[in-house]
């Protein structure tokens, strides 16, 4: 009975058929990193402003992240999506993630879930 609202395709690969299938299920309102070519005419909120914190899948790296963050700050003033693969993190990678969170808090970033951002957009 659990209905997820955000959807992220495996390997972030989606097409127009994926979008059509999601739209047939009204509880899906958000897609992460949807392919812009498949999004034409879609009412789904496409959260695509990704800032990498992993230099490779599962490899969290604070220095890599801060470079990505600074490079994208002007381009993504409203929101940034951080994607991670915590099932691949060991204690060292988790420590790097904690440093990222501390850094973002020091920058006065606000942390919200995709559905909260989607709801805020709908109120505008």
Image (cartoon, helix red, strand yellow):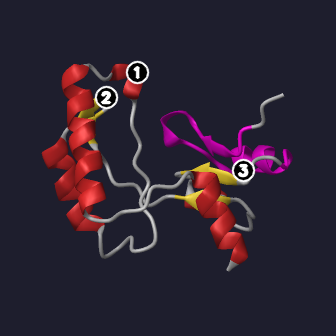
- Residue 72 coordinates in the image, percent (x, y): 29, 66
Is the C-beta separation of discs 2 and 3 under 8 Å? no
Q: Quadrant of residue 123?
A: bottom right
Q: Does 50 appear above or below 70?
A: above
Q: CA distance from mark 2 to mark 3?
A: 27 Å
- Is disc 1 placed on a helix, strand or loop? helix
**Would residue 37 be seen by someone viewing this image from the given angle?**
no
**Would residue 46 be seen by someone viewing this image from the given angle?**
yes
Q: Which residue lies at the image location 64% right of the left edge and 54% below the top edge?
A: 115
Please give the residue where the numbered disc 1 appears in the rendered image.
87
Please give the residue where the numbered disc 2 appears in the rendered image.
58
Q: Does 60 appear above or below 36?
A: above
- Residue 97 coordinates in the image, percent (x, y): 27, 38
Relative to the observer, which residue lies in front, 39 or 6?
6
Which dot marks residue 19?
A: 3
> Is 92 left or right of 112, judged from the image as shown?
left
């Amino acid at each position: 009975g659990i209905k997820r609202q955000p959807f992220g395709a495996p390997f972030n690969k989606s097409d127009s058929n994926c979008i059509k299938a999601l739209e047939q299920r009204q509880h899906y309102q958000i897609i992460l990193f949807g392919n812009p070519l498949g999004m034409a005419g879609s009412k789904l909120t496409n959260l695509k402003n990704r800032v990498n914190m992993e230099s490779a899948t599962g490899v969290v790296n604070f220095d890599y992240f801060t470079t990505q963050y600074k490079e994208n700050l002007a381009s993504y003033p409203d929101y940034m999506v951080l994607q991670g693969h915590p099932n691949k993190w060991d204690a060292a990678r988790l420590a790097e993630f904690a440093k990222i969170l501390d850094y973002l808090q020091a920058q006065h970033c606000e942390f919200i879930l995709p559905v909260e951002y989607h709801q805020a957009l709908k109120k505008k």
